Amino acid sequence: APGEKSVKKFNELQAEFLSAVAKLKERLTA
């Protein structure tokens, strides 16, 4: 499918974003 590459890229970026948010939450609640 033509959109598969961009979907994969989006999923990778989303995972990075979510882990960054998790780290921020850890800092704030620590």
Image (cartoon, grey):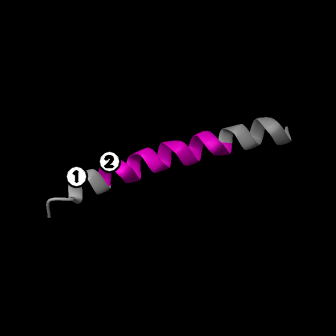
Secondary structure state at the residue bearing disc 2: helix
User: Looking at the image, which residue sits at the far bottom?
Assistant: 1
Q: Main secondary structure of the magenta part?
A: helix
16 is within the stretch colored magenta: yes
**Labelled disc at residue 22:** none
The location of residue 9, given as percent across then percent down, is 32, 47
The quarter of the picture where the C terminus appears is: top right
Q: How many marks?
A: 2
Residue under label 2, please give it.
Answer: 9
Instruction: Please provide percent x and percent y for residue 21.
Output: 64, 43
Callout 1–callout 2 Cβ contact below 8 Å: yes
| In the displayed structure image, the side of residue 7 where residue 22 appears, left or right | right
Within 10 Å of disc 1 (Cα), the crowding (few <14, some 14-19, many 20+) is: few
Which residue is outermost to the left?
1
- Highlighted magenta segment, given as a residue range: 8-22
Q: Amino acid at mark 2?
A: Lys
Name the residue tied to disc 1.
5
Spatial distance from mark 1 to mark 2, Cα to Cα? 6 Å
**Toward which corner of the image does residue 13 lie, by quadrant?**
top left
Q: Residue at x 84, y 42 (%)?
A: 29
Q: Position of residue 1 (x, y in %)?
A: 14, 64
